[in-house]
Image (cartoon, coloured by chain):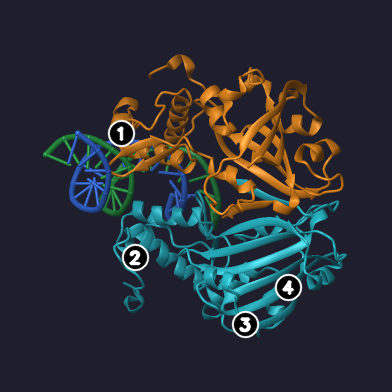
Chain colours: A orange, B cyan, C green, D blue
Amino acid sequence: MMSPDRLEQDNRLPAYLRLRDRIAARVAAGEWTAEVALPSENVFAREEGLSVGTVRKALQQLVSEGLLERRQGAGTFLRKPAFEPTLFRFFALQDADRAKTIPVSRLVARSLQTAPAEVAEVLGTADCIRIDRLRLLKDQPILSEEIWLPRARFDGIETVAEGEIGPLLYPFYLERFGTFVAHAEDEVSFATPPAEIARRLGLAADAFVAVIERTAFALDGSAIEWRRAMGPARSFRYRSRIG
Amino acid sequence: MMSPDRLEQDNRLPAYLRLRDRIAARVAAGEWTAEVALPSENVFAREEGLSVGTVRKALQQLVSEGLLERRQGAGTFLRKPAFEPTLFRFFALQDADRAKTIPVSRLVARSLQTAPAEVAEVLGTADCIRIDRLRLLKDQPILSEEIWLPRARFDGIETVAEGEIGPLLYPFYLERFGTFVAHAEDEVSFATPPAEIARRLGLAADAFVAVIERTAFALDGSAIEWRRAMGPARSFRYRSRIG
DNA sequence: GAGTGGTCTAGACCACTTC
DNA sequence: AAGTGGTCTAGACCACTCG
């Protein structure tokens, strides 16, 4: 209707799923940036030539995926902080105030690299960007991260000024590359760190670290990020909700 | 309609939520045990005096909560193995076949106890049953668990024959006490174990263990179980899906 | 008070499973 | 062929937010 030139995949998916994708794309394109309301159900229904019930179903899909939030009487809004909460689950928030003290991020290195086989298999390509990042809480290094991104999707991120990126990567992915992280899979384990990592974290050579390996996925289910984070085992806490 | 003597809480919740609770209660009561279909949408609608759309919404709630599953053309079914998958996330399945080798469970001790303050606060009572359990894979102890249950809900579980309980507790909670574990919150950390636990696990005194502290919740959101599990850190893997 | 999302109804047609 | 759940429509009324 609106843009038949960019029809994407119209392979007979239900109307509410196709609408979901269309709205997600417009969100990613930055059409309704801040905390401004999206069009109402009725407006969407008229514009898209669908019934209100179908529009509602599409919107609620996006709510359940964390992209939007709806407030009765007020409207439908972006949920920019989406996924932020999950970033706090790594750290031992043993501060007196376990407030939202976002750890400071310091980019140690960024470069184009050929991903190791394990990573390339997950991301579907070996043509990658690697980011090494150190995260600190109160000047104490608490996490050393190694992040792999497919170059096709994140081209140029290796040269973006560090100040532009901010402490949280997922909001930046959305704003800059239109890529929304819909879900992720984590795997936590325990190991002795490589010497280089131990040094970065200020640990003894025979210390132990917790290891979090994460694969992040876009709305369409494709893997868009692989990362491995290591932090001192003693102060490590990982929170998770099941079910 | 059917049993007005047990009206529970009719505090003006939406009809579809009240129906959800009614169906969940009947499931818990064992009304449709095996892999037999539940009544169809139309039957429920007629019986409950609601429209099909409302019945559908209640059923889909239960699907999203993991109690039921629906198959187009076939019907609506119980999902007994609910929550089983999450029980495998603890273990390093480094076997050649990473099949569903359920670890063997051995009950070490069961007794009525006053719960420590930390646990009592979560469960809402200090009048508890404590279960100590050891889990083994190929005769190797891999997890030592300390489980706290509110006595009001699980009275008698401390004397049930061990053979009746089986290796998985959550299905047993459902079958015996009508308590469905709807979700849980885990917290993973690493520590040096108490001497007693180290001994049970066959570890050196200065070894590291992974610690999983879990609170499990019923459908109505009340906490029904607290447990702490410890296992050798080196062979530990914890998988989690976010979002 | 106008507009929003939340609930609920009463249908229709379709895709699928089962017999 | 009959019955099931999945999609979609076109309304209704309500609870809530906001100007």
- Counting from the top left corner in percent of width and height, residue A81 is at 48, 38
Residue at coordinates 44% horizontally, 56% vertically from top-left?
Answer: B59
**Residue that badge 2 annotates:** B47
Secondary structure beneath label 2: helix
Q: Amino acid at mark 4?
A: Arg
Secondary structure beneath label 1: loop
Camera-side residue of A5 and C15: A5
Q: Which mark is residue B113?
A: 3
The 10 Å Cα crowd at callout 2, few under 14, some 14 to 19, many 20 or more, is: few
Q: Viewed as shown, does residue B33 lie left or right of D19? A: right
Q: Which mark is residue B125?
A: none
**Residue that badge 1 annotates:** A40
Report the chain holding disc 4.
Answer: B
Between marks 2 and 1 in the image, the one whose residue lies nearer the viewer: 1
Q: Are marks 2 and 1 in contact (CB under 8 Å)?
A: no
**Residue that badge 4 annotates:** B133
State which quadrant residue B225 falls in.
bottom right
